[in-house]
Image: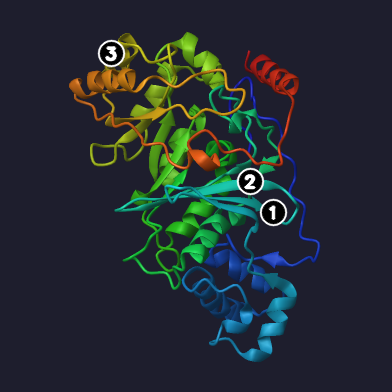
């Protein structure tokens, strides 16, 4: 969808190639959309409504991938459904497990595009980091994913498919609210979710549906680098927790490391946070702040961060993220002592500022490291792309 503003830095994502076999993938469709698909294929309206309810339950509550297991649908109708529809999953190109238990999957779409997702297990929760685009367009300089070109948006089905695949791998069918390993979702994988708003909204609506995957909106966090015009819509139409990739407190530094700041500045971004629907002390906005040595980690930076949060009266917490290095990265991670000092200043200001423990570094699954292995570019190509994006941002 077009993003309001004088300059739109997002290149047009490539169109999605239809399946070669012509079948419609039902994963990612709402109950009404399943009904509409069945009716369009020839079922009369009353039967389409009944079948849609049954199929929706089998897909999202039972994890079915084949119509033949749907015992409340007549066997004679199974071949008709199989001929016209599919219950898909992304193809797994590679699955890796870190020494700390973090899992990363390199996935491939039906049209041959690669993207990644990560599952992070903890003692009291399990978090799935979900991608929203193939590649990225924002070129945040500390982020390995940002060195990729944007190929296309992921569909609602491809976004939901990541959750389905994780549930497959964890053996969590049928769906149930208690005893799950996968308890939380963060839209923090490859891509900027608010530059794929419609598909992200529709996918999360399916994930939150009480008759299916039934994950509470309080268990889902959407992270944005600051696409200000879309933030109010995200709060109103999706309603999940908000995380903001802030990473700097001055225009000069944020312009460098998060180039989107050249279009939507810190003050505009923080005002959008203050206006975000549903934000309160029980549902605080999370500010993500990657710790870069001698770049954004001084005591003055910490004090300015406290001042800004207080000035905009934000119900907020700060996640301090030790920089996760990657080959060719232009920054170093702040020292543990510097991170502790930075955190202490924010805590003393009355704001929670825990330091995120890096997870999955040994398989390049940590924050900012996601980048498909198939995507290889020279340093000159990366520099040229960075210059083009900065020029587009003015």
Q: Position of residue 381 (x, y in %)?
A: 75, 23
The secondary structure type at the circle numbered 2 is strand
Q: Nearer the viewer, residue 37 or 105?
A: 105
* Crowding near the residue tagged with mark 2, few <14, some 14–19, many ≥20 C-alpha atoms within 10 Å: many
- Is 305 situated above or below 283? above
The secondary structure type at the circle numbered 3 is helix
Find residue 372 and report its image quarter.
Answer: top right
Q: CA distance from mark 3 to mark 2?
A: 38 Å
> Residue reaching furthest right?
20
Does the CB distance between marks 2 and 1 fall below 8 Å?
yes
Look at mark 1 in the image and give the residue it sits on: 109
Look at mark 2 in the image and give the residue it sits on: 115
Q: Nearer the viewer, residue 189 or 106?
A: 106
Look at mark 3 in the image and give the residue it sits on: 303
Between discs 3 and 2, the one toward the N terminus: 2
* Crowding near the residue tagged with mark 1, few <14, some 14–19, many ≥20 C-alpha atoms within 10 Å: some
């Amino acid at each position: 969808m077009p993003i309001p503003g004088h300059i739109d830095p997002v290149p047009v994502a490539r169109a999605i190639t239809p399946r070669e076999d012509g079948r419609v993938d039902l994963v990612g469709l709402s109950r009404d959309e399943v009904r509409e698909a069945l009716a369009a294929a020839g079922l009369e309206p009353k039967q389409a409504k009944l079948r849609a309810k049954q199929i929706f339950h089998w897909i999202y509550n039972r994890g079915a991938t084949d119509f033949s297991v749907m015992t409340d649908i007549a066997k004679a109708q199974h071949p008709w459904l199989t001929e016209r529809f599919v219950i898909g999953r992304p193809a797994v190109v590679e699955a890796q497990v870190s020494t700390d238990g973090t899992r990363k999957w390199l996935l491939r779409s039906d049209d041959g595009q690669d993207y990644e997702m990560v599952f992070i297990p903890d003692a009291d929760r399990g978090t799935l980091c979900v991608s929203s685009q193939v590649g990225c367009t924002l070129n945040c300089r500390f982020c390995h994913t940002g060195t990729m070109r944007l190929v296309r948006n992921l569909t609602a089905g491809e976004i939901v498919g990541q959750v389905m695949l994780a549930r497959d791998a964890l053996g969590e069918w049928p769906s149930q609210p208690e005893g799950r390993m996968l308890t939380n979702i963060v839209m923090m994988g490859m891509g900027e979710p608010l530059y794929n708003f419609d598909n992200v909204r529709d996918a999360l609506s399916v994930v939150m549906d009480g008759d299916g995957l039934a994950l509470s909106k309080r268990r889902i966090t959407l992270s944005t680098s600051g696409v200000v015009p879309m933030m109010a819509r995200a709060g109103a139409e999706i309603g999940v927790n908000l995380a903001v990739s802030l990473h700097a407190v001055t225009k000069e530094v944020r312009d460098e490391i998060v180039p989107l700041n050249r279009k939507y500045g810190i003050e505009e971004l923080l005002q959008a946070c203050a206006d975000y629907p549903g934000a309160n002390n029980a549902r605080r906005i999370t500010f993500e702040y990657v710790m870069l040595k001698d770049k954004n980690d001084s005591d003055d930076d910490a004090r300015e961060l406290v001042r800004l949060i207080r000035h905009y009266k934000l119900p907020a917490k700060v996640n301090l993220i030790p920089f996760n290095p990657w080959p060719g990265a232009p920054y170093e991670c702040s020292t543990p002592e510097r991170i502790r000092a930075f955190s202490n200043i924010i805590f003393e200001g009355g704001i929670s500022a825990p330091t995120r423990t890096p997870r999955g570094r040994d398989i390049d699954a940590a924050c900012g490291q996601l980048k498909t292995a198939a995507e290889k570019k020279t340093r000159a190509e990366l520099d040229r792309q960075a210059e083009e994006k900065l020029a587009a941002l003015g």
